[in-house]
Amino acid sequence: MLLITLTFIVGCSRNNSMEEKEKIKIGIMLSEVGLGDQSFSDFAFKGLMKARDELGIIFDYRELKDTKTYEQGLRELVKDGNDIVIGLGFMVQEDLEKVAKEYPEQKFVLVDSISHLKNVTSITFKEDEGSFLAGVVAALATKSNKVGFIGGDDVPLIRKFAAGFERGVKAVNPNIHVHITYAGDFGNAKLGEEIAKKMIAEGSDVLYAAAGLTGVGVLREAEVNGVYAIGVDSDQYFYAEKAVVTSMMKNIDVALFKVIKEYVEKGSLPEGNVELGLSEDGVGLAPIRVITFTPEQEKTVETWKEKIVNGEVATK
């Protein structure tokens, strides 16, 4: 009886091992803050879990707090035999390209920046489109005609957020002042609070933050001071439920799921850069909360969205 039981267990173990080998393996190097950021990393994780549940893939991940460098995490994922290795965030690019050059047969995906290496598929978003709509919302919500934008760092990607936001604000009311500043840090909530406090003192009553954990500090300080805020990347309402009017959603989960689905179905990744905007459900707005817009104001937001999708307005 014991022999039969052991044979059954070993047989099951071998079958499970064979099934695992047959499944597509995906590894991801998460962005700076890692899991629990309620933003970039968490949404990427959500997309991978959806791919696991619906497409049958298996996945592994690395966080910077454990690997110390992006390069080390990426190397570990390559050596672990993942079919696709994903680098999350523009800050990963340099290390990802270094590793990708050493492993030309390995398939890589870079999220939020563009690589020109043949074995790297890039996924970028039209942040300016979603931010334009965030600007429209800010313009409709402000009473002081002063609004603020806080970016994590003064880099091309974050400047896309700022430009789109300012254009959206000015499209509704060109007389609104838009105060733009860059924190120089994506992981400092206290710094975000300090910047927000200063902007509020100068009259801004709607703050839009594209600054990771630093941005969370902005949202919370807005709530403390009774002004409005707009979150980013994911629905950040739950960080400051009395302040967050909406969030500019960057649907990383949707993007990763689409790319992985194509790989599962076709055996190959898209080449070059995959860019996703409003029309591809790559960006958008979370539900409007905290403030009640009139039907006319709601129509204003929808009208500008339609204009962007139809290519009738410049958002950069």
Image: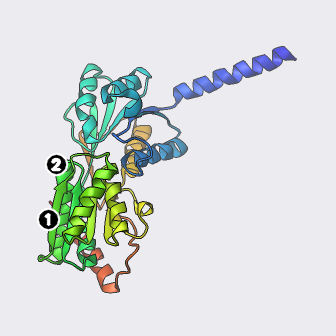
> In the rendering, at what x and y percent does residue 33 appear?
36, 42
| Residue 39 visible in this rendered orientation of the protein | yes
Residue 173: assigned label = none
Outermost residue on the left side: it is 175
In the image, residue 127 above or below residue 269: below
Q: Are marks 1 and 2 in contact (CB under 8 Å)?
A: no
Residue at disc 1, secondary structure: loop
* Badge nearest the viewer, 1 or 2: 2
Q: Quadrant of residue 163?
A: bottom left
Q: Is residue 159 left or right of residue 53?
A: left
Instruction: Find the distance from the CA under tag 1 to the CA under tag 2.
Output: 22 Å
For label 1, the residue is 314
* Residue with the mark numbered 2: 154
Q: Amino acid at mark 2?
A: Asp
**Residue 296: x percent and y percent?**
30, 85
Relative horizontal placement of residue 113, taking residue 1 as reference (left or right): left
Q: Give 142 or 200, whichever is nearer the viewer.
A: 200
Residue under the image location 24 percent in, 23 percent down: 101
Residue at the image position 26 percent from the left and 29 percent from the top: 95
Locate residue 292 relative to residue 143 in the image: left or right: right
Which callout, 1 or 2, points at the residue further toward the start of the chain? Answer: 2
Mark 1 belongs to which amino acid?
Answer: Ala
Please provide percent x and percent y for residue 211. 28, 52
Pick the residue in front: 147 or 7: 147
Please indicate, yes or no, whether residue 315 appears anywhere in the rendered image: no
Vertical order, 110 against 228 (above or below): above
